[in-house]
Amino acid sequence: MVDLLTNPANGLITNVVPRFSWIFRDKRSTAYSQAWQILVASTAETLFEDMGDVWDSGVPSIEDTWKLDSRSVMVPYGGAPLRPWTTYFWKARTWSGPGDPSPWSESQTFRTGELSNEYPRDCQNLVVAEVKPVAIIPYGRGHFFADFGRAAFGTVALEMDTSDEHTVKVHLGEVLAGPGRIHRSPGGSRRYRECALEVQPGKPRHTVVIPPDKRNTGEYAIPMPDDLFEVYPFRYCEVTGMRAGLGRDMIRQRVIHYPFDEKAALFRSSSKTLNDVWELCKYTIKATSFCGYYVDGDRERIPYEADAYINQLAHYCTDREYGMARRTHEYLIKHPTWPTEWILHSVFMAWYDYMYTGDDSSLRHHYEDLKAKTLIDLADERGLIATANMTDSLLERIHYSGRAQKQFGNKPITNIVDWPQSERDGFDDKPVNAVVNALHYRAVVLFARIAEALGEHDDARLFGSRARLIEKTFASVFIDAQTGLVVDGEGSSHSSLHANMFALAAGLVPHRSRPEVCAHVRSKGMACSVYGAQFLMEALYRSGCADHALALLTSRGERSWAHMIYDVGTTMTLEAWDDRFKPNQDWNHAWGAAPANIIPRYLMGIRPLKPGFEEILIHPQPGELEWAEITTPSLRGPIHVSFNNHANGPFILNVETPGNTTARLRLPAKTGKANRVFVNGARAYAVPGGGCLKIDDLGNGRHSIVVS
């Protein structure tokens, strides 16, 4: 990778000092690269001769004392100044010890653009793919129906051999009115459009031009790149007015999306429903990347922080790709939206950008912005915040003024809790409320870690102290002494799902109250939106309720991902669980794709403990799931985890981690068993605690672990 781009040739490098990353492929346990060499050349032929005429980082000396340099991510360029608008070629090799060089990697190409010392925001270019229909149905003279299998953002191209000029009508839609018939009035923000295609004699290929939609191509929307074309979300196409037949080879769905490696992430399990949910959510992340930013589906094409947070984590878990998430996050820092909680999400996104990339440049560049977005300036003497305390000065520091505020009709910063409003479980929104303050606490905790990572020790101490104050105050203000539950706000007696699940997810529920809070959360089911489901799942897995989390992930009820698949028939996640909850919802909203990150990060339990996955947590929480296997990407290479969880047998975990990493294992303890642990056939000592068995400092490579 160059500057976090897996294919830097599909884009431009603008950084005068680009950073290089590679996967260290040594599967021997505890293997670490101890040195490296990078060659950058002006031609492919020069590099083929193992020469770097632009930069040769040098062969490490084995005569002198061996100097350990195990870096394999974000290594800065150290050669002569690069030239703008120039193509370069590079490769690398590593040493596991003196006299032990690896083969050279395959070469990779990167091209510079206009080079600058300013903070770079490089991304790959969008790509155009062509999809054949899975079925074509003829309906009378010149009338054909095509099903492309899945909805996507694009247009239609037709191959026609014609000798005269005439007009063909092309109908694009997401919803069926019946077998082989597109719904012409699907309602809400579900899409249908009729386009006229003027057929020109002697022109074999005709592409439908999508007319701009005033709402999603306006001043505040993210535009499609000038060198591409306008798109529309559709799965089905009807063509009328054809002068001849229409075969599968004569029509294509021309799709635009961000580059996506389908093989980077794989998951399957003993639950077909769970597998289908994974595929729905994974595909949604790919399909909704059509304009190069995370946007709110097709209705507005505007980024929102909460949408982007879920999308970011899901993208990390479905592809080895970080540029699009960073570009969206940094756009939102300067172009925030109106909900109080959404402002706080910018801190969450900044932290996970750092943890998944190992690169602190974005944190450094936006440090003061992120400090403001913790909303610590709204706090009273107890550490709690209320949106009513907002000032013009803070609005400017969080960039919600001028154009950003005008975008939303000068709407003030306001609490949202959940969206749509019908999904708030009767939340009693007091001026000082539990949801906002739980998320504020989380932002303060993460900013303290950001400050520490950047060497800002005074801020780290300040925010750490503030986090402890909020934790103490939260318990006294929001925990009902009689019920043990979290109330919605100061002065409220109502305990919604939201107050309790956000507090659990943030780690704010005292140990003594956890049984009551967990029981209350379980009793509520999925009484929240598809956005709220992200935090509900985090709350359940963080509090040891994996069985209930799995039941919700695989539920066939109305508020479920399975309902979207089997009952509604969508191929991308919906904006809401069903039209009943949000009549104007769209059918292409990635904030509904939470399982794409919940399955890898919590059910399979794979998360970075140190920046750039230098240390990996593997903490599977299978619940009643009999078996599962996953490949999940990381900056340092793919991570493979599988388990067998048969009720009457041992728990068997197989892991394979990339080079230059260590892992911490958290294994489920078997009830009624001795819980003896074996690693690669040898008895191992595991520390019990927190309902699991702990093994630290597991070296990279393949390992088999048995708990019996």
Image: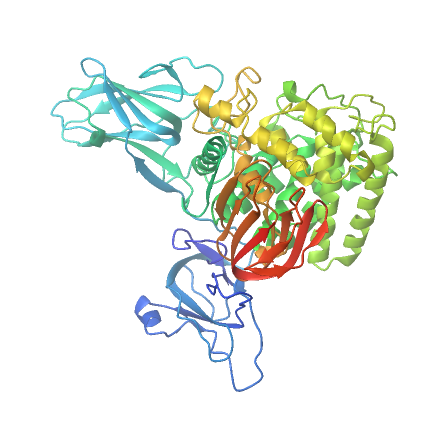
Q: Quadrant of residue 559?
A: top right
Q: Is 140 drawn above or below residue 473 in the view shown? A: above
Of residues 58 and 696, which is closer to you in this image?
696
Residue at x 71% of width, y 51% of height: 688
| Residue 400 visible in this rendered orientation of the protein | no
Tell me where residue 677 appears, x and y as whole percent: 62, 54
Tell me where residue 328 appears, x and y as whole percent: 54, 42
Residue at x 72% of width, y 46% of height: 690
447 left or right of 472 in image: left
446 left or right of 143 in image: right
| Residue 176 visible in this rendered orientation of the protein | yes
Q: Is 483 drawn above or below residue 229 in the view shown? A: above
660 left or right of 432 in image: left
Of residues 18 and 396, which is closer to you in this image?
18
Tell me where residue 537 appears, x and y as whole percent: 63, 34
Of residues 491 and 54, which is closer to you in this image?
491
Tell me where residue 327 appears, x and y as whole percent: 53, 45
**Color style of the picture:** rainbow
Residue at x 82% of width, y 22% of height: 492
Q: Is 202 drawn above or below residue 669 in the view shown? A: above
Total marks shown come to: 0
Q: Is 256 drawn above or below residue 189 in the view shown? A: below
Of residues 236 and 564, which is closer to you in this image?
564
Q: What residue occupies the far bottom of the structure in this picture?
A: 63
